[in-house]
């Protein structure tokens, strides 16, 4: 509704009320009775859309950046842990006489060089590399899940900011109607057809709306500050005032079937696999590590030969009760713990999906009922009360009360619309399947 239309409607309302109370013939009220409490979208330069905001959040959020580096760390680690330990180089002087430190004073004095290589228990390195690879995959799924959570958090703040914007527009519209009521009461009071009490009640109803606007402005500032934090922006952005079109959710049965592909649940499943591999890694501790060494000695005593040495060194896990058995038991406990976490998260997501779906269906029905029955009935009740007031059969206090009821229903409708969209966003998060790259 333009400013010209609002100004024309205000004048028409005042003239109509004064004319009817003076006994003049009834005039048409469609413009005043059918006034919608529609949201007012203020224009701003280059407002940010929700789609662009989501892209910024996934690209600039520092938490996702840290997790991306964690994935890189685990992938590098998966390559490193699967390699053999570094070989050892030994350099030494053997049997060196202390009285002269001469290398050719007697036999067996020599300089030696040796090389040794340790081979861990058979299969241990391959299992550790696979375990680190699964942990990297779990981190990648966690990144996708946290990306979806970040988008959900952004959507919640976005929808709340839109609600406060539209609620302020609705209250301001009501404030205009209350101002018209004040003018009408003043006109009737000056013509000795109304009382001063009615004027005061009308002024009180108008002035009390200023507190509602102030509260909504504070809420909007908080919502925009949260959006700026999510987007890692120094200042709150200017956002589009249109309600976003979120995808409608699938059926509840389809949602529950798709939960196994939810990134956070996949991450928990991968962590369970990694913990189970940890049990196999721990069991390799029952087998010895083998170290193979070879050395060469240079003897400087005349006529003495050089020397070659070789050997094999084995660890002896002959007392497993306090070490290997305990390592295996600890790994089994970690694997069981990971399985319990997965089961608990699966149950939590299932319950969350059912609750969100029930809320979505409830808000959808309530919004439809509000549009079809409650809000139109409230407006009709206001028009009937206003007609009774014009005929002298009702007081201004009744008119103000029914007018306030229209405002309450209009704000409740906005709440249903916000909560319906938030429920759709939650269901979209719960059914997330694809890759989400920051």
Image: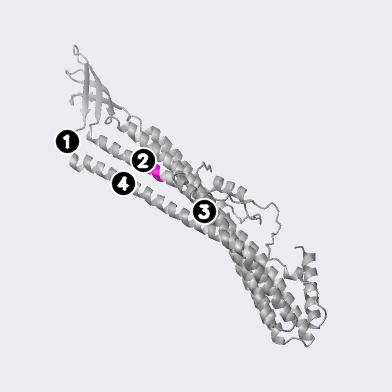
Q: Main secondary structure of the magenta part?
A: helix
Q: Nearer the viewer, mark 3 or mark 2?
A: 3
Give how far apart the Cα atoms at labels 2 and 4 are.
11 Å
Label 3 crowd (10 A; few <14 / some 14-19 / many >=20): many
Q: Which residue is mark 2?
A: 273
Residue 310 in view (yes/no): yes
Q: Which residue is mark 1?
A: 318
Crowdedness near tag 4: few (<14), some (14–19) or many (≥20) residues, C-alpha within 10 Å: some
Of mark 1 and mark 4, the one earlier in the sequence is 1
What span is colored magenta in the figure?
A: 268-274
SS for dot 3: helix
Q: Which mark is residue 336?
A: 4
Can you say which quadrant of the picture contains the N terminus?
bottom right
Q: Which structural element holds mark 2?
A: helix
Q: Quadrant of residue 185?
A: bottom right
Q: Which mark is residue 426?
A: 3
Residue 423, placed above or below residue 189: above
């Amino acid at each position: 509704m333009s400013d010209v239309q609002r100004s024309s409607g205000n004048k028409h309302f005042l003239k109509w009320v004064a004319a009817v109370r003076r006994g003049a013939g009834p005039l048409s009220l469609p413009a005043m009775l059918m006034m919608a409490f529609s949201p007012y979208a203020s224009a701003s330069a280059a407002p940010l859309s929700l789609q662009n905001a989501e892209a910024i959040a996934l690209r600039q959020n520092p938490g996702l950046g840290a997790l991306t580096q964690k994935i890189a760390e685990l992938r590098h680690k998966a390559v490193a842990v699967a390699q053999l330990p570094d070989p050892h180089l030994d350099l030494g002087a053997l049997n060196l006489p202390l009285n002269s430190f001469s290398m050719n004073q007697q036999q067996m004095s020599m300089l030696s060089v040796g090389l040794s290589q340790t081979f861990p228990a058979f299969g241990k390195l391959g299992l550790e590399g696979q375990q680190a690879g699964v942990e990297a995959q779990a981190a990648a799924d966690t990144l996708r899940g946290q990306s979806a959570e970040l988008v959900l958090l952004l959507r919640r703040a976005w929808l709340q900011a839109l609600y406060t914007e539209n609620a302020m527009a609705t209250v301001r519209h009501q404030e205009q109607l209350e101002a018209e009521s004040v003018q009408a009461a003043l006109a009737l009071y000056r013509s000795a057809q109304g009382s001063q009490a009615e004027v005061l009640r009308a002024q009180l109803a108008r002035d009390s709306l200023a507190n509602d606007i102030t509260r909504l402005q504070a809420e909007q500032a908080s919502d925009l500050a949260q959006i700026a934090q999510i987007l890692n922006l120094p200042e709150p952005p200017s956002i589009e005032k249109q309600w976003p079109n979120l995808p409608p959710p699938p059926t509840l049965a389809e949602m529950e079937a798709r939960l196994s592909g939810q990134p956070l649940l996949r991450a928990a499943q991968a962590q369970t696999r990694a913990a189970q591999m940890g049990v196999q890694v721990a069991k390799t501790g029952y087998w010895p590590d083998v170290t193979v060494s070879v050395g060469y000695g240079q003897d400087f005593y005349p006529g003495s030969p050089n020397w070659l040495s070789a050997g094999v060194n084995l660890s002896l896990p002959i007392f497993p009760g306090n070490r290997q058995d305990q390592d295996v038991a600890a790994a089994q406990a970690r694997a069981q713990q990971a399985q319990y976490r997965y089961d608990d998260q699966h149950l939590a997501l299932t319950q969350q999906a059912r609750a969100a779906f029930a809320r979505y269906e409830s808000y959808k029905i309530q919004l439809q009922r509000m549009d079809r029955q409650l809000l139109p009935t409230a407006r009709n009740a206001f028009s009937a009360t206003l007609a009774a007031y014009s005929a002298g059969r009702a007081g201004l206090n009744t008119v103000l009360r029914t007018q306030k009821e229209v405002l309450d229903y209009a704000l409740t409708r906005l709440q249903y619309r916000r909560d319906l969209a938030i429920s759709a966003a939650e269901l979209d998060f719960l059914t997330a399947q694809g890759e989400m790259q920051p």
